[in-house]
Amino acid sequence: MTTRPVFGGFAAAASQHLRKAAGPPGMRATPDGACASNADDVACSLRRLLTVMSRFAADIKAASGRQPSAGRGQPGPWEHASSRASETLRYAAALLQPILAQPRQPGRARQPDPVARRLDAAATALTAGREVLHTHLASYPGGELRARSEWAPVVLSAPVTRALLYELGTWAHQIAPLGSERAFARAPARGTPDARRRLSAACQRLWELDLAVQAADEHDPVPDQDLKLLHGIPASVLVPRHLPEGAEPVTRLCQGTIDTAERVRRHAWAAVPRASWSPALTMESLRESATYAIVISHNCQILLSALATSPQPRRAADLSAPLAEAADAAGEARQAWLQAVRAWHGLLTDTGGTISRAAKEAADLALWTGRLAYATPGWTPGAGPAHLPRPARDLAPRPADLQQVIAAVHHAQDTMTQLADTDHDQIRTASATGRLLMPVHTLPESFDIPYLYSPVPAASAEPLLAAYRDAHAASAQACARTATIAEAIGAPSQILTTARAATQASADSPAAPSRRAPEPAARPRPAMNLPGPVEHILHDLGVTAPETLQRAATLDHATEQLILQAAHEQSMRDPAAAPPDLSRSASTAEIISHLLASGDPRATALLHQPEPRPSAQAEIEP
Amino acid sequence: MNRITAARARIDHAEDLPELLTAAFTAFEDMLAVLHHHLERDDGTFAAFILSATAAANGRDRIAAAPSLPPAVIASYCARRAPETGGLLAEATVIQVALAVAGLSEQLAGSLEAAAGAAAGPGDRDSCAHAARHATRIRSLLGRAREP
């Protein structure tokens, strides 16, 4: 759909670096040095990574504060997970802070640790991914986030922030065993004891984050479509304005349509907050935008009709009826826009002569969709009568071509839907601020009236606003029909549907049940099969016999269960008592880490809750 | 006489700025009525006709803002309950309609450009200049219509 960077590209790169840092599946610390990374290097790199992750957690918290349910009732599991993520990541990063301050031994040049390099690469990828999301947002002092693009409501929506939190949990799940193994590695153990202890404690916090996210996901699963939406969020960089030259193949025309549709959306969105003062808010602009919406809807109707009437033998499913219905819906959108244009009868704006960027871009979109819809390579709106529509065999000879054409129509129709919304809001603002005028025609000619026009009373603006609402409803209906086809054939424009649903769900309620179905595929994170302390010792001794290792694992399990039971009984006797810091000793820290890695949520109760620390330590650049 | 021919005659006979503005206002209205009447006749001309209709509406509203336009014109326009249906070139082909409207818009653009240069008041100059541009746009949209 787009060649621009998307968040998912960087997230996937980070995950890949973390996978490579962990080594091949099944590889564990062994005496031959397979995991003999330098704990100091790993801790330093991990701190950079955790700093980036803590910024993500802060973003999630800030976004959650903007969502409608914020401050209402008891926090849900995702709110709890968000809160835990902020605390655990900040604390984990702070734990590793002093290691950074220790100077490396002078005069000792050595190869950078490979695991540390992977962690650094993951931190870089995640920093870039966060930048992609932040191209849509402006940060203000105090952590307030404001929208800078039409994608911002999506980025700040509850579904996307939950998906991001889910990803944080996934990364924590990848990092924690990696760090724990380095912390507890025996011969040839490298790194200072202090670094290893801090590394172990930081990784315990990551297990805690992972468990909190898993608990939230079990209670209220993140749908796969929300993860796809998060990954598909592009950087806020518009493709430069360009027009068709006349010889473009259908593929290029589709991409030009998609690029231009996004430009229209951006400029229309940006115009809304300026409506009270902008000289570009003119009757001509709004009327032209609406007129181009008619032409675009008409072109979409022609395209869908052409596809509906073609035989298309290679289709997996017969789409003729849905395509015909979509074409009819596009025709109804066209009629609704026509009524919006007519509703301007007798109304003016206080400024004139300027044509807005959105209207100019809408003219471009009419040209791109027209070039796609008609067989004439040099088609323009003024080309004259009897231009034949482009036949379906040229439009979509292969299934992949059909995906592209449908994606282009989908983008154009989504843009018309957004345009109706933004223009409605502009008109409403113009009316409220006295910028919408009507003739003072009721007075006799003999009266000395100083002005020909006066501001429109609210009631007189209502028919125009109603016409735009109708245009929005009809365009949304047409878009929904095409979206259904896009989903059926796997067109890349499906992200639009998810994005609109996400913002709608956030507007209604973050837990809107209507968009929770279908349930996501089960994504249980496997419990990490890390060796416990006894098993670890046997590995160090070179024992490979499965029965012996199994006995060691059983002993480790029994030890952990005994500790859990003892902790539970202690908490029953004195519920107010905070658990002691069991991780201060390397031997107990290893047991606690192993418990956390097993995925037992009771293990988090064994973690010593730190005193609040200044968060500034986590703000050092990674 | 159809509405396009009548509009051309009124522009020809306008003797001063208020008369020209009145004729221009009515001419834009006439173009709008004719274009909407023939809008759905041909898929190929639909885009040109609807864009021309919008340009005609914009031109009309620009003239409506001219200080020298007699207020009665606006009052009459606003008081009108339903558009007149006569003289809409019902028998013409879409090409003939397009060329007729293009001819009127060309004449109108010329007259308004001249008026913009000669008008004393800035409001009138501005209105005439902008309306002339809308008329020119109509001519460019419809003037290239040819029989296939």
Image (tube, helix red, strand yellow):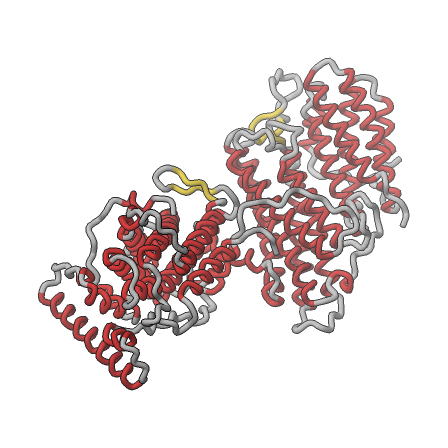
Q: Is residue A184 toward the left or the right of residue A582 in the image?
A: right
| In the image, residue A595 above or below residue B69 | below
Q: Quadrant of the N terminus of chain B?
A: top right
Residue A240 falls in image quadrant: top right
Question: At x 60% / y 67%, what residue is drawn?
Answer: A488
Q: Is residue A488 above or below residue A609?
A: below
Q: In x, y percent, where is residue A612?
A: 22, 48
Residue at the outermost bottom position: A547
Seen from the viewer's position, the closer of residues A262 and B75 is A262
| Image point (63%, 31%), residue name | A348
Q: Say whether residue A413 is left or right of residue A129.
A: right
| Residue A176 spot, x, y in % from top left | 33, 63
The residue that appears at 72% across and 30% down in the rendered structure is B60
Asked whether residue B148 is in view, the answer is yes
Q: Residue at x 31, y 59 (%)?
A: A39
Q: Nearer the viewer, residue A404 or A459?
A: A404
Percent of width and height locating residue A444? 64, 21
The image position of residue A309, as x and y in percent, is 75, 66
- Which of A54 and A288 lies nearest the eye of the viewer? A54
Judge from the rendering whether residue A500 lies leftward or rightward of residue A594; answer left or right: right
Residue A511 shows up from this direction: no
Q: Seen from this angle, which residue lies furthest left?
A: A573
The residue closer to the viewer here, A145 or A208, is: A208
Q: Quadrant of residue A407 in the image?
A: bottom right
| Residue found at the very far front of the displayed protein | A107
